Image: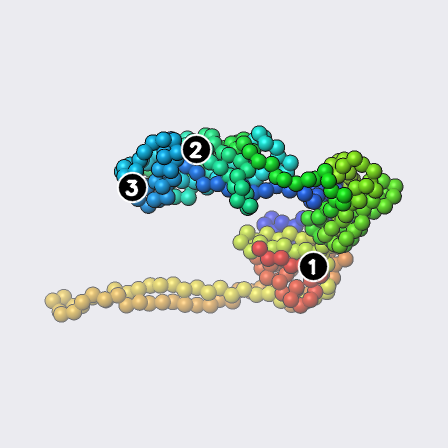
Amino acid sequence: MRLILAICLTIWAAGSAASPVRLKDLVEFDGVRSNDLVGYGLVVGLNGTGDGLRNSPFTEEIMSNILERLGVNVTGEQFRPTNVAAVLVTAELPPFSRAGSRVDITVSAIGDADSLLGGTLIMTPLNAADGQIYAVAQGTIIAGGASAEGEAAQVIQGVPTSGVIPSGATVEREVDFQFAGLERLRMALRTPDFTTAIRIESAINEAYGHRVALMIDAGTVEIDVSAAGTNSPAHAIGRIENILVEPERRARVVVDQRSGTIVMGEDVRISRVAVSQGNLTLRIEEAPLVVQPNPFAEGETVVVPRTNAAIQEEPGIGLAEVDGGTSLSEVVAGLNALGVAPRDMIDILKSIKAAGALHAEFIVR
């Protein structure tokens, strides 16, 4: 039996149920979330790899604004340095960040700069979705790529036009959210499922010895903070987030056509079906013929196109029977018995799903 697993990756838990998982790895707690920040700034100190100001006029504009704020009058001046670049700065404000704490930032060129390597980001305010400034970024950029250029060739490794500044932004404003005042704490399941939600409810109530949690729907479980007998929602989370819960997983088959990867869940089942598969190879060859006139004759040289096209049908599998599997190992063994390549297996799985014999969610990426 030829295994297709060399390229086609199949993952499953060997004949056992899913392992228990900590509650904190299954849910998101209400109010415990990060916020995205973005800003527009200027990087200076580049070694001639900055924006060409003729193609990036916004770089000249922001440079003029910065110099004006620093008391340098550049109105009407013509300056075109090549050591500056306009960038977008992005960051993620972690939950419960306090004023004065530091966060990492990512810096990306938006003009025609060749590299940000060795550049310094000038003080850049970072705004949230509400338009308010929550952090200010500044520092030396660590770029992850390199580039070299000559008269007729250029070599680039990685992405030198993007970099990071560890702890490059200082939090200036805190998110106004009264977490301690919550009377009810909601937990949102990352993968909504009724069975998993009721297991979470049961596990929490069992840990407390009385009803504290209530399943609202497949994606939400609610905690009564007062019934938990704790001083604050933070105490309640600290007590329940390490409770072990066995999640329920949906039967899924995920395929990636570009790499020929197939991933099957443990609960995938296939009903008894018959499969026939063949391949067609289309071959087209261009062999143009040059025709010239006779010596000393009037005429011109022309190219006559010649194309050879052929379709070849390669022998495939005949009508093969795939027995219904009651476990994932039986399903894999039945599919392997077809003896086809991984990319052909993807097409076979699509057809089995269309025939209603594949009892799983089929996801194509």
Secondary-structure class at tag 3 = loop
Among all residues in the image, which is located at the extreme left? 296
Name the residue that disc number 2 marks.
Answer: 122
Secondary-structure class at tag 1 = loop
Mark 3, Cα crowd under 10 Å, few <14 / some 14-19 / many 20+, is few
Q: Are marks 1 and 3 in contact (CB under 8 Å)?
A: no
Q: Are marks 2 and 1 in contact (CB under 8 Å)?
A: no
Cα separation between marks 2 and 3 = 34 Å
Residue 174 at what x, y percent from top left? 60, 36
Q: Amino acid at mark 2?
A: Ile
Cα separation between marks 1 and 3 = 55 Å
Residue 229 at what x, y percent from top left? 83, 38
Residue 141 visible in the picture = no
**Which residue is located at x 38 percent, y 67 percent?**
308
Quadrant including the N terminus: bottom right
Image quadrant in which you'd find residue 278: bottom right
Q: Amino acid at mark 1?
A: Ala
Name the residue that disc number 1 marks.
Answer: 360
Name the residue that disc number 3 marks.
Answer: 152
The disc, 2 or 3, on the residue closer to the chain's N-terminal end is: 2
**Which residue is located at x 16 percent, y 69 percent?**
299
Which colour scheme appears in the figure?
rainbow
